[in-house]
Image: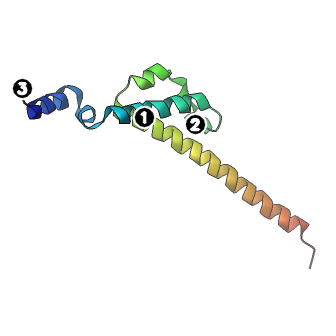
Amino acid sequence: MTRGLWKFRCEIVHGNEHVHTSRREKQKLQVEIKRQFDLGEKGLRATDKHYLRQSLNTILTSSVREQKYWLRSVQVSRAYMVEAEKNMFVGMRDVMRRWARLPD
């Protein structure tokens, strides 16, 4: 069987993602998913904690597309919380500056 036919067969049987995703890329993806699981629920929005209620094995055995979606969702949730904390401290600092300012 020629390489072109084999690729076509893989696209039909496994979907496009298996043909175009290298083994190294899949390993990097799985390492990052494991890292997110190790970080736990701390730093996630309350509405996104359900992502970590699935088992690690369930995520790692899902399709590459689903793994990327899961990982991106968790990363965005963590980034949102970091930004929310920064904004909270900026707002608190402004309130304290106004409070501590000498009256006119």
The residue under the point 46% across, 41% down is 72
Residue 40 visible to an observer of this rendering: no
Say what amino acid the circle numbered 2 marks: Thr
Q: Position of residue 93 (x, y in %)?
A: 79, 60
Instruction: Please determine whether, in this image, residue 57 is positioned above or below residue 51.
Output: above
Q: Is residue 58 left or right of residue 44?
A: left
Say what amino acid the circle numbered 3 marks: Met
Say what amino acid the circle numbered 1 marks: Leu
N-terminal of the two: label 3 or label 1? 3
Q: Secondary structure at mark 2?
A: helix
The residue at which mark 1 appears reads as: 29
The residue under the point 44% across, 30% down is 30
Report the quarter where the N terminus lies: top left
CB contact under 8 Å: marks 3 and 1: no
Q: How is the image coloured?
A: rainbow
Q: Quadrant of residue 81?
A: top right
Q: Secondary structure at mark 3?
A: loop
Distance from label 2 to label 1 (Cα)?
Answer: 23 Å
The residue at which mark 3 appears reads as: 1
Q: Position of residue 27 (x, y in %)?
A: 40, 31
The residue at which mark 2 appears reads as: 47
